[in-house]
Image: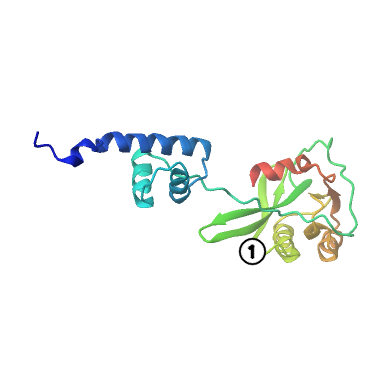
Amino acid sequence: MGIKRATLYYKPKGKKETDIKKKIEDISREHPYYGYRRITASLRRDKVIVNHKKVLKMMKELGIQGRIKHKYVTTTDSKHNNKIYSNLIKDKELTGINQVWCADITYIRILNGFVYLAAIIDIYSRKIVGYAIGKTLYPKLAIAALNMAIATRKTDNLIHHSDQGIQYTCKDYIKILKDNGIRIRMSEKGNPYDNATALIIL
């Protein structure tokens, strides 16, 4: 009939691409953190041979992008033998600023990693009264934030509240609090909600 042999085995390109895109969507739904390379590997395990560059192009056409799986960063190290102070501010009614400060540390993700932010917040006004940014969790980071707060605010009849992290229980930090007549209170172990004010703002 004058028909080439290859014609007998021809499959429309559009149909094949549609099938691959459907599989890509299925894989992405099941594994939202997969990027184009892992999706390509998954397709090949299903006997779908396709170039990873082609998969990337199809993902862009479908508007699919693998989510970044953020690593959890611990900022509280409570495994120490430093003195722990009780939490006595749960039912305290605040009437003004400089009655209770809440200290906490979080991290900020940047292009090539992350940095730590130590902050002290006035619970009544919800204003940050002291802060410091650094690349390590050494106590000097928390101390820098504390010194800024003390330099700009009055500390008469003030309560300092924090978690039981080593930054807030170390001798240098406690000495600064006591030297300025600041009373010390800490969250109960395993109860992060005691520091909820700082956590919400940070």
**Quarter where residue 13 is shown:** top left
The amino acid type found where label 1 is placed reads Gly
Q: Position of residue 73 (x, y in %)?
A: 66, 53
Extreme residue toward the left, this view: 2
Question: Is 110 or 30 nearer to us in this picture?
Answer: 30
Side (left or right) of 101 relative to 5: right
Please say which color scheme the image uses: rainbow
Image spot of residue 26 (x, y percent): 46, 34
Which corner quadrant of the image does residue 175 belong to?
A: bottom right
Q: Residue furthest front?
A: 1
Residue 124 at least partly seen: no
In this rendering, would 14 be left or right of 154? left
Nearer to the camera, 119 or 73: 73
Counting every numbered tag in the picture gives: 1
Viewer-proximal residue, 77 or 83?
77
Q: Callout 1: 10 Å neighbours few (<14), some, many (20+)?
A: some
The percent coordinates of residue 188 (x first, y second) are: 85, 44
Q: Quadrant of the N terminus?
A: top left
> Would residue 172 be seen by someone viewing this image from the given angle?
yes
Q: Quadrant of residue 200?
A: top right
In this rendering, the answer to whether 185 lies above or below 3 is below
Q: Residue at x 80, y 59 (%)?
A: 166
- Asked if residue 169 is positioned above or below residue 198 in the image, the reply reads below
What residue appears at the point 86 percent right and 44 percent down from the top-left corner?
87
Vertical side of 70 occupied by 145: above or below? below
**Judging from the image, what secondary structure is the residue with disc 1 in?**
strand
What residue is shown with label 1?
134
Image coordinates of residue 79 in percent, x first then y, are 84, 57
Q: Look at 66% across and 47% down and name the residue there.
A: 127
